Amino acid sequence: MNIAVLGTGYVGLVTAAGLSEFGHTVVGADKVAAKIEAIRQGRVPIYEPGLDALLESNVRKGTLSFSPDLAASVRAADVIFVCVGTPQGDDGSADMSQIEEVSRLIAENLNGYKVVVEKSTVPVKTSVRIKRTISLYNKTGAEFDVASNPEFLREGAAVSDFLEPDRIIVGVESDRARDLLVRIYERFKDRVLVTNIATAELIKHASNSFLSMKISYINLMANLCEQTEADVEQVAKGMGFDPRIGPRFLRAGIGFGGSCFPKDIRALIKIGDDLGVDMSLLKETERINQGRIRVFLDKLKTALWILKDKRIGVLGLAFKPETDDVRAAPSIRIIQALLDEGAAVRLHDPKAAENMKEFFPEDGVRTVYCDSPYKAAEGANAVLVCTEWKEYADLDLGRLRGLMANPILVDGRNVFDPAAVAARGFEYFSIGRR
Ligand code: NAD
């Protein structure tokens, strides 16, 4: 099967590499020519474990290529996977301009029957818009189908998620499109759920918002724990034994971030509001999440009172471990608040520092990037943990303490064992436990 993947970001690159690994001939195309050129030269523009090797082996096999020529890529394809961005728009809804742009491009290059697959996360009923747009600009009258195949990969584990998915959702409205998509995912036929298109579209938003809700729920419990003798880690563990609840996504902390959960929950709220459906459950989920930064900074202020002219080490910039992605990372709001209050920050992340420099350029005085967590701690009045990278859990706490001006550790991800940190002489603040 000849497949074109439009958009070679986090999802598109993994999709292109994964589909070629399944035996299809795939071209990945992007409108940013420099990105395609970098990929062609073996410089993968994102950090994702295992992606470099998967790309390289499929390019070498000759089943995977990359092109800046979107039109030619569309013309050569039987199936087109749309993986462009759907960022948050001004009113909370998803900004669909990239989807509209590729829909027009596909229409103008429709030289025979093709299936256009929404892989990007889109509002329910987007397929109707895509169909209308393609029909509007389709000069040849060639037939096409639109289908939905939402992507569930997690950044940091994207390659294994794509190669070993827990489910594949295929939303279609014709047998022809269904047969093609089921063939593409032949090897996973026991895990394919075929639905109508609106259902497939909604499954993605419903899943992300449900996971967001779990996170906000445990964070609400963390607030209660902090006012009682309860320990949120134990509460989550005890809840997680129940198979109806499960242990995952019950980590209390500074809230969810990233390029998906915050924007997807807002988009779903907007969809419901527009349709007259009461979305207050998700509005509370979002409100609780927004409040996490204040809860965290209040702990720092309990320790230091005034932040002006204080030096704060920040460990972890990415929105979660094993990625370089800082889009909507909680650390952004935290660093901004520190700078606004007159503090100086010393920032460290194993992979995401370069991306963060776009938000907070290095000035060598108030904003300093450090190549090790120990450097970030040098002379610090407090160190904050914003991302639970494994290397932070393995830090030599005695060494860290020796470098700091005040031994204050504010841990937004419950990386450390309170007793172990206290034994090293730290004043330790964490989430939902004493
Ligand atoms: P991204 O910003 O990393 O990638 C989008 C790519 O599309 C960019 O390379 C951009 O240059 C390209 N692009 C934009 N307009 C284009 C056009 N007109 N023609 C061709 N290329 C174009 O975004 P992402 O993180 O890969 O997310 C893509 C979609 O997948 C979003 O809808 C997102 O919500 C969804 N999604 C993301 C994840 C994730 O973990 N990142 C997981 C599941 C679903």
Image (spheres, grey):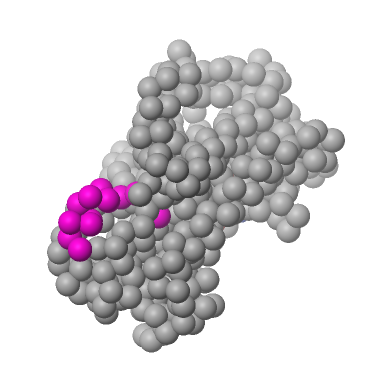
Q: Nearer the viewer, residue 155 or 246?
A: 246
Find the residue positioned furthest to the top: 190
- Return the x and y of residue 293 as percentages of the image width and height: 52, 59
Residue displayed at 17% across by 60% down: 424
Q: Tell me if residue 420 is in the magenta stretch.
A: yes
Q: Quadrant of residue 122?
A: top right
Determine the residue positioned at 40% across, 39% down.
230
Task: Give residue 233's position: percent from left, percent from top.
Answer: 36, 39
Give the residue at x 68% y 24%.
Answer: 199
The image shows a total of numbered marks equal to 0
Asked whether 66 or 383 is in front, the reply is 383
Q: Choose between 72 and 427: the one closer to the eye.
A: 427
Residue 128 image offset from top left, x and y in percent: 78, 34
Query: Taking 400 as reference, is 244 above or below it?
Result: above
The answer to whether residue 376 shows anywhere in this view is yes
Q: Is 385 left or right of 181, judged from the image as shown?
A: left
Whether the magenta-drawn stretch holds residue 403 is answered as no
Depth order, front residue of 63/420: 420
Residues drawn in magenta: 412-425
Q: Decide: is 148 above or below 418.
A: above
Q: Is residue 332 above or below residue 67?
A: below
Question: Is residue 390 shown to the viewer in this render?
Answer: no
Q: Position of residue 161 (x, y in %)?
A: 40, 33
The residue at the point 47 percent across, 24 percent down is: 245
